[in-house]
Amino acid sequence: MIGTELFKEVSPLSSKDCFIVIERLKSTFNFPIHVHPEYELNFIEHARGAQRIVGDSVETIGDDELVLITNPKLEHAWVNHECKSQSIHEITIQFHRSSLPDELLDRSQFESIKTLFERAQKGVAFGTQAINKVRPLLKTITCETDGFYSVMKLLMILHELSLSEDTRELASHSFIRQEKPHEKDPRINKVIDYLNKNYDKQLRLSDVADLINMSEPSFCRYIKQRTSKSFVDFLTDIRLGFAIRALIDSSQSVAEIGYACGFNNLSNFNRIFKKKKGMPPTEFRENYRKKKVIV
């Protein structure tokens, strides 16, 4: 019998351990989309063409891949897609949130790691420069026999990654339904909060600009500077985040979801969705559900 419930992985990490390292050499990805309470750092090499799914982010990966996920409810998986490699190398590090308690993360020396963990609520992908920086540590931590030194190596990995600018958040803010943005600028927080509450309405640029007392041209420059997107693209991504969540979690029709998320007609919704996600919403829903299935 085939079910569509989200698979909740039971990690082999014990309550007495700080973390666990799992190294695999394999020729295929066969684990369904899943969630788990442990934080996870996943390194993959020699898997060009495989597909990474983290929330509403679906991307084809290159030769090297490194992703950190700290959200216990964020769905994720890697699937074969177009990968032809027979020598996929994967190193997965899972660790308890309690291994680095707030009392420690609140210290100034851990500030950058705390910020990284907050960003990784959406999943964070690291670029080639960051991967090459920690690759030697990732490969030696797998054979470290001294538990204390292995913890030190994990902290070094997290520290190096937290200092890197070669990073990118994956899932959208609206998809993970994050209650409060982690931006330090209260103006962008105000804009994000307003868009999250009004994405289903027909919004005017002037109204959103007025919200933070800016002229339209100044507001457009500000949004571009803060998000690297135009206001239209930024709003569209928020709407798509809510739409994808509905496609996954609800039985509403594609048309109903499109209208409910602020798209003025079905053809427009289909066109924008395909442009952003590489496939129409119906196909996305079917593919996502198939990858959640356990036979």
Image (spheres, grey):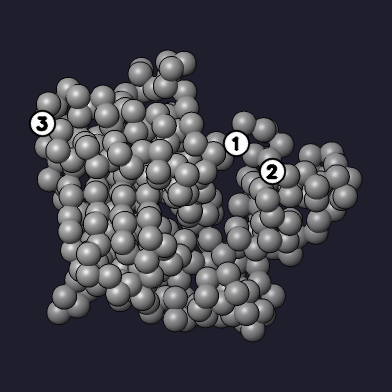
Q: Earlier in the sequence, mark 3 or mark 1?
A: 3
Residue type for callout 1: Glu
The numbered mark, 2 or 3, whose residue comes first in the sequence reads 3
Task: Please say if the residues under marks 2 and 1 sit with CB atoms less than 8 Å apart.
Answer: yes
In the displayed structure, does residue 64 sit left or right of residue 252? left
Q: Quadrant of residue 131?
A: top left
Residue at which label 2 appears = 226
Which one is closest to the eye, mark 3 or mark 1?
A: 3
Q: Which residue is mark 1?
A: 183
Mark closer to the observer (2, 1): 2
Residue located 31% across and 49% down the image: 42
- Of the residues under marks 2 and 1, which one precedes in the sequence? 1
Q: Which residue is mark 3?
A: 145
Element type where label 1 sits in the image: loop
Q: Residues within 10 Å of mark 3 (few under 14, many from 20)?
A: few
Name the amino acid, label 3: Thr
Q: CA distance from mark 3 to mark 1?
A: 40 Å
Residue 96 x, y percent position in the rendering: 24, 35
In the figure, 234 relative to 113: above or below?
Answer: below
Residue at 46%, 16% in the rendered image: 108
Q: Closest to the observer: 162 or 201?
A: 162
Q: Amino acid at mark 2?
A: Arg
- Marks 2 and 1, how far apart in space? 10 Å
